[in-house]
Image (tube, rainbow, N blue to C red):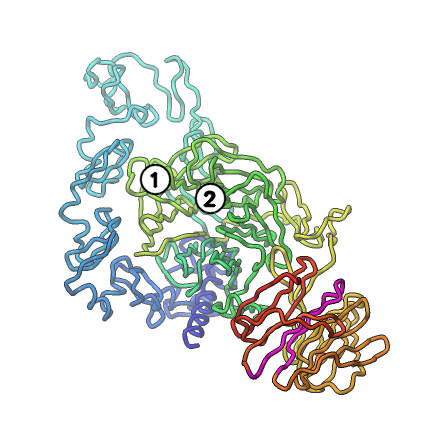
Amino acid sequence: MFRLLLLAGTVAYSSAFLDSLMKGRSNCSISQFQCSDNRCIAVQAQCDGKNDCGDFSDEKDCDFILCREPSFFRCKNRRCIAKLFVCDRENDCEDFSDESDCDYFKLENLATSTCGAGEWQCTDKICIPEEWVCNQEIDCLDGSDEGVGCTINDHECDGFRCTNNRCIPKEWRCDTHDDCSDGSDERDCEHHFDPTQCTLDQKKFLCLDGKACVDLTNVCNGRNDCLDKSDEGPRCICPAGYHNVNEKVCIDINECEEYGICDQHCRNSPGSYECFCEHKYMLQEDKRTCKAIGGEATMIFSSKTQIRSYLLNSDLLFSIANNLKQVVGVSSDGQHIYWTDVQSEHEAIVRASEDGSDREVNPSITQTTHHQLPSTFQVIVTSGLGLPEDLEVDWLTGNIYFTDAQNRHIGVCNNDGSHCTVLINKDIRKPRGIALNVNDGTMYWTDWEKPAEIATAQMDGTNAMPFLRDDIGWPNGLALDFPNSRLYWTDAKKMTLESIRLDGTDRRVTMFQVILKDVVRHPFAIAVFEDKIYWSDWNTHSIDSCEKFTGKNHHTLIKESKDYIYGMSIYHSALHKRIENPCASAFCSDICLLNGVSYSCACSEGRLLHSDKHTCQAMEKRQMLVLAAGNALLSIEHKTLGKHSLTVLPSVVADAGALTYDGRNHSIFISDLTKKSIVEFNLHSHSRTTLPIKGLETVVSMDFDSASNNLYICDSAKSTLEVVSLTTMAHKVLIYGAEHEVPQSVALVPHDGLMFVSFYDQRKEQSHIDRMSMDGTGRTHITEQDLNGPVKLHFDSHFNRLFFADAGTGVIEHINID
């Protein structure tokens, strides 16, 4: 109980902080903080102990921001993590400072020991994964994993080999950036040049023989800087922003055609160009990079049994949920965090409210299959799921889209799971990643079964078609870079991160991992935000990042020692454009879906869209399960896909003992053990009538024969099997059990004139099942083997079989009625 309360408290606390962080709608600059009244103050004034906003909103959540004890822990490398992560046997700090003072750590790692398979032992006896050795990141406390021996590298280098043995693309050589981290790529650059960068626009002059590049200031200076003396000959020179055509004509250079010249948008002009940003972004001093304004971006990721959040700027790591079963996909809409659970027989789509206000509507049902979830988690989908590996939320309509590899389809549910339907189930085999372009109503998904592909459709499931099939191995995660209209994906077989324009042109492999083959090994999830891409890797058990255009500035953000990192999602309000929601006034009866032009109405599984294109009608009679326990009466409507709907019915008995159904009148008969009576309850009108049957004691089982209008009753107190005509109210005892034999359950087979009755033999302390005619004659003993009891019976007319549940053994079995 204590662990559960602690977890719930953590969720509520961190969710409150996320709420304030993620819901920002700010016009303040990056260097400013927005007060609750939308006033902007200097960011340095936040959490300085002074009421600068006037309402103390600048002094809220300062434990998070300042990483204060006891809720948070400051690592030696300055990362801030939740205190719950300290001494949890995970290297959350990435420098072991959260584990190094723990008793278990000293005992296990500072003693003489050997590491397991796939691990490497540091000089100080700490064990780390072999993949972490010589990766330019210090993981051992003593740094021995990056020491002597790392100068030897068996990998071929198709680019430039740094002095520290790092391999970088040759294009990075002499580009004024220290990509080697030791400066070796920027040494001896006087005679090294890239001809494509030796242009007049760069104030450089390329000698006619192509063997040298000289500064424009050295042209026509009376000195031959080119071996062929071409720098002193006649030449037409164009002004900046223009290039020479036929050595005579200068025309404008369209700089906007250059890949990655602007972070988001580019506007060409004669002789120049201008970068500009989307709404809620601000152009930086470099005049090309766009940074989001209005709160900090949050990365949410899953690692099997955990969901955690990581603040990209603050380097703050904290927990959202623990002790889950098998989490894969994660997503967020700024109000809730959603995830998929793929554990066999526990498949579900779940959400958690940021402020902890969600409560499961039917906790009694949830606890049966998802008993580990605290009340702040709401199970959205429980029925019809096979292997839901990924999901994404349509933030405009609130709909939840998901892939299901086992059922081979893509489904969608509204945000509470009350209506769900399958959108794509043709020409789809093993769907995994999914991405939504809410701005134009399209969706994309990966399918990794041969022939692997990336496919696309409208968000209502129409116009489904392949998007990319050439040179695809094992496509996993998908992510959209909306401002650049590019789709990014990971390919685990090719070990690549790739992207393509949404019009299908300009496919590119990120140069970074082409050269550094030991960085991207088994990429899974991917996300794009601002000028960076982020990906998880199953081989390195990590989340990494780099610049999205060049692949530079590689960083490892998160490392797990053993668990895979599965789903990953980044939320910031800037990712959601201000666009009109056509579903807001659509009045669809079930689900409203975007379709690129406007909207489409869709129906839950088992329902059909009416000719008005808005109303859904049932294709078959509703089926429901009615449960009685004590004085509670509940009905559960089964959903093929979605969430079973639960309705609390009026209480009609004090202590329910048995119930059976009358299909003619849509009524149920319920025995009341306290009042020793039987009540008829109409499921339509909710009217109730007590049947005038005398002499009842403890009615533990009933079954109804609609053809004869007779009600059969097992009374355990009297050890009798009885029948009552509901037409004449005539009452007859069919079987008097022996003093040691008690009837427990009755099941009728009216079309054969048979019934089955289970008895409990008090002398033998076991149960048995008998078959007889419906008048009680011709009794035959059919089975008693391995029946402990009590045993409940049910005849299924569709399969023509008798089902029996043994509470003593916990087993449900079935036999043919003959």
Q: Is residue 181 above or below residue 801?
A: above
- CA gap, disc 1 and disc 2: 18 Å
Image spot of residue 602 (x, y percent): 67, 49
* Residue ranking furthest to the right: 728
Q: Quadrant of the C terminus?
A: bottom right
Q: Secondary structure at mark 2?
A: strand
Please give the residue where the numbered disc 2 appears in the rendered image.
478
Image spot of residue 209 (x, y percent): 25, 15
- The answer to whether 657 appears left or right of 359 in the picture is right
Residue nearer the viewer, 328 or 752: 752
Residue nearer the viewer, 790 or 393: 790
Residue 529 in sight: no
In the image, residue 171 lies in the stretch drawn in magenta: no
Q: Quadrant of residue 71?
A: bottom left
- What's the residue at 30%, 43% (across, down)? 519
- Residue type (three-letter) at the residue carrying disc 1: Gly
Figure disc tally: 2
Q: Quadrant of residue 767?
A: bottom right
Front disc: 1 or 2: 2
Q: Secondary structure at mark 1?
A: loop
The secondary structure that most of the magenta stretch takes on is strand
Q: Quadrant of the N terminus?
A: bottom left
**Mark 1 closeness class: few <14, some 14–19, many ≥20 residues within 10 Å:** some
What label does residue 638 carry, if any? none
Q: Is residue 88 above or below residue 762?
A: above
- What's the residue at 23%, 71% (across, down)? 103
Look at the image and give the residue range highlighted in magenta. Answer: 741-763
- Residue type (three-letter) at the residue carrying disc 2: Leu
In the image, residue 760 lies in the stretch drawn in magenta: yes
Please give the residue where the numbered disc 1 appears in the rendered image.
551
**Mark 2 closeness class: few <14, some 14–19, many ≥20 residues within 10 Å:** many
